[in-house]
Image (cartoon, rainbow, N blue to C red):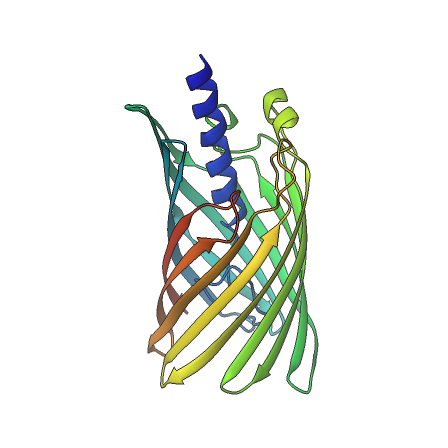
């Protein structure tokens, strides 16, 4: 029974890590968003995925998250985008020879990003969002209730460099009492990122950040560092790859992120 409980806790923990990092990004593989928008009537499709590995006390967690449909950003105006996402998660927990697996669609996200100010290379945006309970909370694939988020984004451009800062807040609501008891509802996020064009069409990117730990039993907030690249095959088609490493114990040990971005 103790082993089953521990496995369930580990499973929920990795799923929460995948959900939090499953928001849409303007420059994947960065976790930190930028203030860029698509332009009125233009769209962007992001085919992104991530694979996380966590090892602790002989227990190995492996989590894969890919979109059931690509993240879609659509330009409502030159400075405002509407963003939709519906990830699919597959999580495996290996504990003393036993394997637990959960697969399925998670909660759908809808976000509105609006750039509100631009001057002298600086730009600022706000991004409110809502998470709809499309995932099965009984399997740990969703919260079972509507949740909310709000982010403030700043970007500084000084070619060939660009710098980004995100400060955000997430309010997670839970349908199951067990999830309510195990998780904090109010989560803050802070992160910074930088990218630089090293040669034509190739950008290198680095990212660090921290969020409040949703696990009520821990007072240590997970922190990460990430490095990766973005390569533009054409003006409208990018591929990217990144590796995210834990800076402390609550963060997933290693996460590999990859994606394809197609602008229409």
Query: Eyeballing the image, is 176 above or below 238?
Result: above
Residue 136 visible somewhere in the drawing: no
Of 226 and 131, nearer the camera is: 226
Question: Going by the picture, which residue comes out furthest to the front?
Answer: 57
Quarter of the rendering containing residue 64: top left
Q: Residue at x 40, y 48 (%)?
A: 67
Of 175 and 31, nearer the camera is: 31
Q: Is residue 113 left or right of residue 258?
A: right
**Tally of numbered discs:** 0
Q: Residue at x 43, y 82 (%)?
A: 197
Q: Position of residue 248 (x, y in %)?
A: 53, 49
Q: Position of residue 184 (x, y in %)?
A: 66, 35
Q: Quadrant of the C terminus?
A: bottom left
Question: Going by the picture, which residue comes out furthest to the left?
Answer: 97
Q: Is residue 38 left or right of residue 182?
A: left
Query: Eyeballing the image, is 182 above or below 165?
Result: above
Q: Residue at x 56, y 47 (%)?
A: 222
Q: Residue at x 45, y 71 (%)?
A: 205
Q: Is residue 219 left or right of residue 158?
A: right
Q: Position of residue 75 (x, y in %)?
A: 55, 67
Q: Position of residue 143 (x, y in %)?
A: 57, 32
Q: Quadrant of the N terminus?
A: top left
């Amino acid at each position: 029974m103790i082993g089953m409980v521990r496995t369930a806790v580990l499973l929920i923990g990795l799923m929460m890590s995948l959900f939090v990092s499953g928001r849409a990004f303007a420059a994947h593989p960065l976790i930190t968003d930028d203030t860029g928008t698509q332009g009125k009537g233009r769209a962007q499709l992001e085919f992104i995925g991530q694979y996380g590995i966590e090892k602790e006390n002989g227990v190995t967690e492996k989590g894969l998250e890919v979109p059931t449909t690509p993240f879609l950003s659509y330009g409502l105006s030159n400075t405002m985008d509407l963003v939709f996402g519906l990830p699919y998660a597959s999580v495996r927990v290996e504990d003393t020879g036993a394997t637990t697996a959960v697969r399925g669609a998670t909660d759908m996200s809808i976000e509105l990003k609006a750039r509100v100010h631009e001057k002298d290379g600086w730009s600022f945006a706000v991004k409110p969002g809502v998470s709809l309970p499309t995932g099965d909370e009984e399997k740990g694939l969703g919260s079972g209730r509507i949740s909310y988020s709000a982010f403030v984004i700043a970007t500084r451009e000084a070619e060939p460099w660009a710098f980004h800062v995100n400060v955000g807040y997430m309010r997670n609501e839970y349908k199951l009492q067990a999830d309510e008891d195990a998780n904090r509802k109010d989560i803050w996020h802070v992160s910074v990122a930088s990218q630089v064009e090293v040669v034509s069409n190739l950008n290198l990117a680095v990212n660090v950040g921290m969020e409040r730990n949703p696990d009520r039993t821990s007072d240590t907030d997970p922190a990460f560092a990430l490095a990766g690249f973005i390569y533009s095959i054409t003006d409208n088609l990018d591929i990217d790859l990144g590796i995210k490493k834990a800076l402390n114990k609550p963060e997933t040990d290693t996460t590999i992120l990859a994606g394809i971005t197609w602008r229409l």
